[in-house]
Image (cartoon, rainbow, N blue to C red):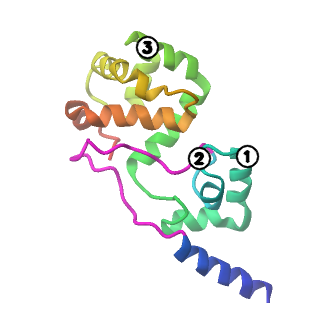
Amino acid sequence: MKKLIIALLTVISTFAFAQKKSSQPKDNPSEKFDRQYGIAGCGLGSVLIGKRGAQIFASTTNGSWSNQMFGISSGTLNCVDSPTAEVASRMDQFIMVNRSRVQGDIARGQGESVAAIGQYMGCTASSNKIAVTLKSSYTSIFTSGATVTEVTDGIITAILANPELAKSCQHLG
């Protein structure tokens, strides 16, 4: 009986949380890059708690019943595969550890952390071009109370909005 209930819940969640798989198209840079999950990642926790909620609870929920693995395999539960989302996850970790330095370097329009972000995205453009673009987008990247994932998404959005940089950053979409 227990297995039947789990199987039924799995089937119901597949339809309830199904979403279209998509990736950020490189040829349409006007779209905003926006992940639907917080630092805890995708899974049922991201659907129930959201990206601004208590991520410890989202992480615990994601880990229970292997729903995160199911979401990744099926492309549901906010687990949409794209090369840009993969890069964003690595950038999240870097920004989490170096947030004040990243924020300061972007505000100044220069610095090692900006060069590192360019390397994460596989940009062949000079770090100066990246820095200038990010500096001009500073207020949209570092909004009041922005989470790490929102900062990362803002950085990627700013890069994708510049057609020259979008083409030079091979790890994005």
Q: Residue at x 56, y 23 (%)?
A: 99
Side of 117 where 48 appears, left or right = right
Front residue of 41 and 12: 12
- The mark found on residue 107 in the picture is 3
Residue extending furthest front?
144
Q: Is residue 170 above or below residue 128?
A: below
Residue 32 is one of the magenta-drawn residues: yes
Label 2: element kind: loop
Q: Residues within 10 Å of mark 3 (few under 14, many from 20)?
A: some
| Start-end of magenta stretch | 17-39
Q: Of callouts 3 and 2, which one flags the residue occurring earlier in the amino acid sequence?
A: 2
Asked if disc 3 and disc 2 are in contact, CB closer than 8 Å, the reply is no
Q: Of callouts 3 and 1, which one flags the residue occurring earlier in the amino acid sequence?
A: 1
Q: Is residue 15 above or below residue 65?
A: below
Residue 103 is one of the magenta-drawn residues: no
Residue 151: x, y in percent? 49, 32
Residue 55: x, y in percent? 68, 45
Instruction: Quickly name the residue at label 1.
Output: 56
Label 3: element kind: helix
Asked if disc 3 and disc 1 are in contact, CB closer than 8 Å, the reply is no
Residue 45: x, y in percent? 66, 57
Magenta span dominant secondary structure: loop
Residue 122 visible in the shown view = no
Q: Residue at x 49, y 13 (%)?
A: 104
Amino acid type at circle 3 is: Ala
Residue 172 visible in the shown view = yes
How far is mark 3 from mark 1, CA to CA? Answer: 30 Å
Q: Residue at x 30, y 15 (%)?
A: 128
How far is mark 3 from mark 2, CA to CA? Answer: 25 Å
Amino acid type at circle 2 is: Lys
Q: Residues within 10 Å of mark 1 (few under 14, many from 20)?
A: few
Which quadrant: the N terminus? bottom right
